[in-house]
Image (cartoon, coloured by chain):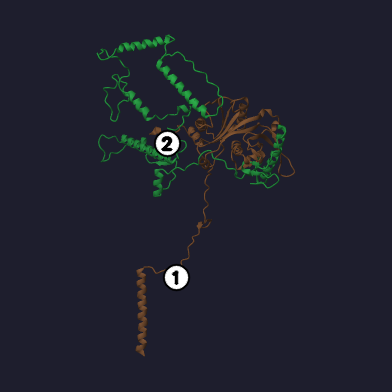
Amino acid sequence: MTDGDAASCELDLGNLMAYDPSHHLAATPSSREELREECLRKATELAQAVADALFALPPNEDRDGPIVRLPPPTTRLPREKHLPKPNPPTKWEQFAKMKGITKRKKNKREWDEQTQSWKRTYGYDRVNDDKDIPIIEAKATDEPGVDPFAQRRDDKKKRVEKQEKNRLENLKRAAKVGALPSHIQLAATALPITGTKADLPKKSRKEDLEDVAGMASSATASGGKFDEKLPGEKPPKHPGKHRKFLPVVEGKGMGNLEKQQNDKILNSLLAKSSEEQIDVGKAITMYKVKKEKQRRKDKDMSSKSNKLKPQKKPHKKSSKKND
Amino acid sequence: MVAAIRVPKSRRAKRELLKHAPKLVETGKKTLILHGTKTSAVLNSVLSDIYHLKRDNAVKYTKKNDKIRPFESGGESSLEFFSLKTDCSLIVYGSHSKKRLNNLVLGRTYDHHIYDLVEVGIENYKSMESFVYDKKLAPKLGSKPFFAFIGEHFESAEELKHLKEVLLDLFRGEVVENLNLAGVDRIYVCTAISPTTVYMMHCAVRLKRSGTSIPRMELVEVGPSMDLVVRRHRLPVESLKKEAMKTAEHSKKMKNVTKDPVHGKLGKVYMPDQEVGKMTLSNDVKGLKRERREAKKNKEHSKKQKVNPSSES
């Protein structure tokens, strides 16, 4: 809605908004106070324009004051949630539509023939309750030894289970379309009622499950060696020994393994205490890495502009410790 | 199988969950106000002022949240989680650092995913308490505000256009059809003083008696006033924007249906002109037989007539 008067502002009555796109602020107002004054003045004009349009609408007099009907807002703002999808018809609804079955209203009370009284259709004191049947007459088709009361109870249980299964099937179908009723949430994505994001159940990966299964299968007294394998169970991923022991008797061909092992231990112990021992291998690697970095930097320096860069502190060559 | 679906165990929980359901025509959006690891005194004051302005439909978190980085791809997940938990679609996130002083991020969500963001810096802030005015004029909580946007920069600068939309969304409250004219008491005034800054004020509106039936407006500054300097902004993805702007379908008007109190529902059936003369004969054998029979009979009759006069003569 554009207002064609001197103010030349755009009005959005549904949002009670007035917008003046043609106003140029006088070149840098000298003080904050002046800016404020001008803004207030201009805003009063705009507010007056909105009020003019508002009071021009036909009012309904109410005891609190005049009530006007606002037009819908013209500025379009985005929704906060998606449009609700209609539920897909359940299996029973589809069947009823096909057959032309219409819903009929049931009364709250019905006449119960068994007890000759008015009872509720469902709930506490209901019609056709199993409790009220004192005697069930035997039929010719009945087998001896079958309890008809227990039979009735089992039948009812089966009916309830079947209904529950159908209800879940309907929900699954609705969830597939994306129209799950909003008070029902899928457990996999549902938020816990109290708690933080860390409490959300995390889906385990296949590899994690296989690892855990492998560990569990070998966590027996004999290392899982004598257990029967289930069909489809794969052998554990890291079988065998995790420690290396020296052979008890050394053959002729082998070197002095025990001596080597002891030397290694002693060297590392002594190296920790002394200050002069260096790990030659590690020192060589460090030197190589440093050289590589220097070479790369020189290449970069030559390609980039020759700006002076602060020199990096040269590394101190520390004594090597075998940690 | 049963564990795959969570159902609320009590009616109250069910009612609460149904309140969060998507509606065909939406009511007001809720706001979530929170801050990051470091805030300044100015920023604290700004956040609490915004909370007071929107008391009924805003949630303010008091703890600091360190994993939120709105403009980075991974840092929004906390915001989305909070939006889901509190069912808020407007987010006001304040943080303060040496690089970005007094930073305020105004964000909107769609389906609890970040829709768009605007980052502003607060300057020249004056809090609500610092204004002195007649307390009788104070705007009541929950009243529908007026808006005044002044300045050509709102049209020319992309960021200010976006900021205008976000400010409108933030402060407008519910969309109502019926408005009580006696209850208008506040106005938000936003002036674009440069292509990146908006000077925002909040004033109370006083309706004064004037000669005509339309009262004269008088503005008294009551609320916080601040300069919003737009730093960064992220517009919504085009496809998401299209989906979010969809409105509820209006029921189509049925044509050719009239309701008559006597006859009930009436409609007209229009038949095309049949042009019987131009139609070919059908293969209706019985009819053809009858025609032939009759034609033969007539011919016989005429022949007999012919013969008889000749015989007579």
What's the CA distance linking mark 2 and mark 1?
73 Å
Please state which of residues A61 and A171 is positioned toward the viewer in this rendering.
A171
Q: In the image, what residue type sits under mark 1?
A: Gly
Near mark 1 (Cα within 10 A), the count class, few <14, some 14-19 or many ≥20, is few
Q: In the image, what residue type sits under mark 2?
A: Gly
Locate residue B123, reporting x and y percent. 64, 30
User: Is residue B245 among what the camera can see?
Assistant: yes
Please state which of residues B6 and A64 is positioned toward the viewer in this rendering.
B6
Q: Is residue A3 above or below residue A28?
A: below
Chain B takes which shade in the image? brown
Q: Quadrant of residue A273?
A: top left
Q: Quadrant of residue B28?
A: top right
A244 relative to A84 in the view: left or right: left
Tell me the element at label 1.
Answer: helix
Chain A takes which shade in the image? green
Q: Which residue is mark 2?
A: A123
B92 relative to A163 in the view: left or right: right
